[in-house]
Amino acid sequence: MAYKKFRADRLFDGYRLLDDPYVLIATDDGIIEAVVPAPDAGEDVQSFTGILSPGFINCHCHLELSHMKGLIPEGTGLVDFVLKVVSQRHFPEEEILAAIEKAEDEMLNNGIVAVGDICNNTLTLPQKAKGRIYYHNFIEASGFNPQLADQRFEKSAGFFREYAKYYSIPVESNSIVPHAPYSVADALWEKIIRFPGNHLLTIHNQETGAENELFLNGTGDFLRLYQEMEIDISFFKPAGKSSLQSYLQKFLPNQSVILVHNVHTSSEDIAFAQKTDKKLTWCFCPNANRYITGQLPALEQFIRHDCEIVIGTDSLASNHQLNILEEIRTIRNHFPSFPLHQLLSWATINGAKALQMEKLLGSFEKGKQPGVVLCHHDLSEARRLL
């Protein structure tokens, strides 16, 4: 069997950043054979300047919004951002499909091999069916009016059936998930969490301070959102607790949940979450947070609490690019004490575990096919080698 052998200045295997001379050995189709000391690698080793890494995992994206790149100005705040997405997302289908293809090309070129993708329609299906990137499709359900729960859930279930029918990866790569705590009625929650096979879920969590204000006091900017969207919330009674503490127990004990954004998650919220029986992963999309509100989560507190952390890009409606390295660069600029191997692990093995793809992706271990990416030392660029 023919092998490819790669050596660079540094090698990140998914867990450790190795400075000593090691060589990665893989088959022509990218299946990992071994990581060995350079003297044991034999001949025909290709040498590069930079860092070798497994392919990156983008744990939160909205590929279907790729046609909205640059359409919404920065700094609107979340409520106005949501209103603009709802009112301005409707384009001719051919333009949406072309933007989806271009966005997937961008992710591939930036070393991304797997994506947790939010779906509110089936427009990404034709592109995903080409099998160039692994996807877990999070089919989103929303509806704050309890009287519409059956209708809203059946719509999402219809999309789920389409993905399960046509998508090339097994049904286990699809879930029906709640959009956000402020947009899902209790009756809809019940249908989502009890949907057969819904083992992996995700939710937008505490992206703005107004979310906590709503659940604490029944006040804040989300009231304007409901008014603008003509949603009657007279039934709603605030729990007197933060958003996360109000909804987290609704998930079932056997469900894994990726909490996304977490900009206004407190240390008390994290401690509360860790006392539950939920398997939680915390996903951060710093460039989208800066785009929408100009804020960033307090990442140090998640590290202090030893949280499982992963990285996402969000959508091109809220980001200038779909590039995990750019997210890492933003984190390093604002949190320079975080070691590089830790950030790379969030983008590789942690992401693979969060999307339940760790048997195939995320690290250079024998038998896996994680992709091989070469990064510049300053993380300004990456390119796929395999």
Image (cartoon, rainbow, N blue to C red):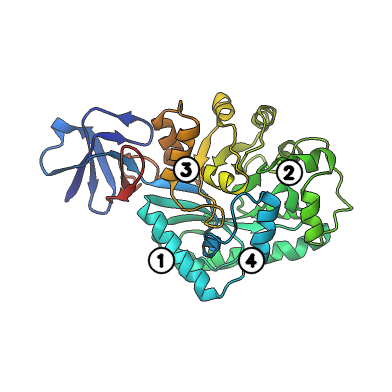
Q: Disc 4 and disc 1: Cα gap in Å? A: 28 Å
Which structural element holds mark 4? helix
Residue placed under numbered mark 2 in the picture: 211
Tell me which amino acid carries mark 2.
Answer: Glu
Q: Disc 4 and disc 2: Cα gap in Å? A: 23 Å
> In the rendered structure, which disc, 2 or 3, sits on the residue that comes first in sequence?
2
> In the rendered structure, which disc, 3 or 1, sits on the residue that comes first in sequence?
1
Residue placed under numbered mark 1 in the picture: 130
Q: Nearer the viewer, mark 2 or mark 1?
A: 2
Left or right? Give the position of 165 relative to 148. Answer: left
Residue 327's mark? 3
Tell me which amino acid carries mark 4.
Answer: Gln
What residue is shown at x 55% (from left), y 41% (from top)? 283
Which structural element holds mark 2? helix
Residue placed under numbered mark 4 in the picture: 88
Residue 75 placement (x, y as % from top left)? 62, 49
> In the rendered structure, which disc, 3 or 4, sits on the residue that comes first in sequence?
4
Alpha-carbon neighbours of circle 2 within 10 Å: few (<14), some, or many (≥20)? many
Q: Disc 2 and disc 3: Cα gap in Å? A: 24 Å
